[in-house]
Image (cartoon, rainbow, N blue to C red):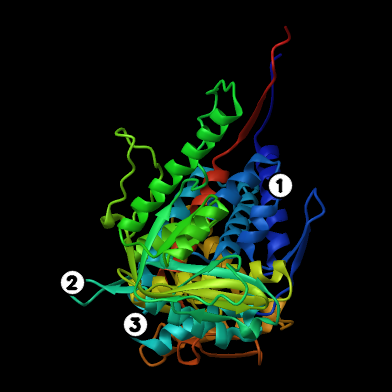
Amino acid sequence: KNLEFTTGQKTREQNVKECLVLSDLLKSSFGPISMDKMIIDDTGEITTTNDGANILKRLETNHPVAHILVNLASQQDEEIGDGTTSVVIIASELLKRADHLIKNKIHPSIIISAYRLAMCYSCSYLRKNLCVSSGFNDLGTLLNTAKTSLASKISGVNSKKFAMISLQAIKSVQIKEQNQKKARCQIKAIDFTKIQGQNMNHSCLINGYIIPHQKFFSGFSLRISPARIACFNVDLRRSRLSSGVHAEIGEAEEMKNVSREEYEITRKRAKEILKSGANIILTSKGIDEFLQKYFLKNGVVAVRRTSLDCMKKIAMATGAKIQNNLNHTNEIYQFDPLFLGEAEEIFDQEISKNEILVIRGCRFCPGGTILLRGTTENLLDEISQSLFDALCMVKKTIEGRKIVAGGGAVETSLSVLLENLGSSIDKQEQIPILEFGEALMMIPKTLAQNSGLNSSEVLAKLRILHRASKTEKFKKYKYFGLDLGSGKIRNNIVSGIIEPVLNKIKCIQIATEAAITILRIDDFIFLKKKAE
């Protein structure tokens, strides 16, 4: 009496239906020639995007299975930085074909076993036969990887410029390992600053960190070299009594004495900071006007309301230690010079009537800030997200040092491979393996459909080439994929339509696991509250 449940085929059909709704929603926003989605939330805020991760984040999915698919697809975005839409499309197609097989009396356990076998076999073949080695100093390959990622985003019109910005930003935070054969990229050291005004072509990479701030005084120009930076995550305003503490004052003179003492405590703290040799002070909280003037008189610039995330990046790059507490047990605040960060210089600049501070030449990591320009806040957010995806793709290419052809080349090659594998198996897993290969073909099919091409004709030609690639004479055909601009088929490795191999492998793995997770659900049990 206290529960309701649905079971069997009805449950599976509903699960597949919910996943296909998500897939159909994202399909038209997939690829370099795609459509945008306009999302209006309950407060009336409008977001226009074609990024799969952004769309899924803003969707309110009530069905638990759709929620599972969204969470697993988001895992792709967190681990790799791109490929969310591909995961949803492949997983939904796998579920659709599994549902059809179950209706034809093939048990779900056999389908799950076959899907896992096909996934493992595909990933192994992908690593050994379909990827091409790439050095972390191969700038042409890294630039093409960024272009491929940006081609499907809102910034795709300016993909060449933004790809160059992405490459320069990644190279500024690239660190070689001790053996000099591997490299890693501290992508967290790259910051984004968005300033409305002008168009996106005026975006650029700044060699340093940018801190938005209010102008100190009219006509005041700042340039300090070298910079010694103190970072605080505390309020530097006048010291006051703690919350809940009351002081009973009977005379006005006593009130003046209390106020004078508060100023004196604040001034002592300021003197201790000055003794350390700091000439730049950043705080995420407030600073009193009198204290800011006091610092300026002593040649020190204090900036208030600095973003804590930005401060953490600056602290990591300069070697500063963020102070979270000014109260010491001996009641005398002491600021150790070892807490200071170091940089070559800091100066102020005005952009579209916005005052900014630029910190250059950080001690431990050069770092950098991508300054984004655009007409609207929504456009700036979209450019920021697309650039971050491109940064992740370049990072994975540098660290993995292997790339694969894009444009549906990998999926078509794996589909032909699984077709041959399925034909050589006499067990019940044969048909699900073939269906797995057909599900992968949804990627080139969707790309072709979104570009207005005749998908049947184009995919038939692509299959013929990839079947021929299994022979030694025509083995280079395995890199052939779609050229969506001309509607032709070409060698995408040569043409520069490439992706890091890890992106493809993770996409297939997560999509398969998502399909298997949902396929294993055969009952929904809804618990009700007991009547009191």
Identify the residue position indicated by label 1 in the image: 60
Residue ID for mark 3: 134
Label 3 sits on what residue type?
Answer: Ser
Eyeballing the image, is 528 above or below 27? above
Horizontal and vertical percent position of residue 99: 63, 50
Q: Is residue 72 visible?
A: yes
Label 3, secondary structure: give it.
loop
- The numbered mark, 3 or 1, whose residue comes first in the sequence reads 1
Q: Earlier in the sequence, mark 2 or mark 3?
A: 3
Q: In what element is the residue under mark 1?
A: loop
In terms of sequence position, does the residue under pointer 2 or pointer 1 come before the other? 1
Q: CA distance from mark 3 to mark 1?
A: 41 Å
Q: Residue at the right extreme? A: 44
Q: Residue at x 64, y 77 (%)?
A: 373
Of 405 and 292, nearer the camera is 292
Residue 216 lies, with reference to residue 452, above or below; the image says above
Residue 424 shows in this picture: no
Q: Nearer the viewer, residue 284 or 492?
A: 284
Q: Is residue 468 left or right of residue 225?
A: right
Q: Residue at x 70, y 82 (%)?
A: 198
* Quadrant of the drawing holding the N terminus: top right
| Distance from Cα at disc 2 to Cα at disc 3 | 19 Å
Check the image and name the residue furthest to the left: 179
Disc 2 and disc 1: Cα gap in Å? 47 Å
> What is the quadrant of the C terminus in the image?
top right
Q: What amino acid does circle 1 point to?
A: Glu
Q: Would residue 199 be found to the left or right of residue 172 on screen?
A: right
Determine which residue is flagged by label 2: 178
Amino acid type, callout 2: Gln
Which of labels 2 and 1 is toward the front?
2
Q: How packed is label 1: few (under 14 Cα within 10 Å), some, or many (20 or more)? A: few
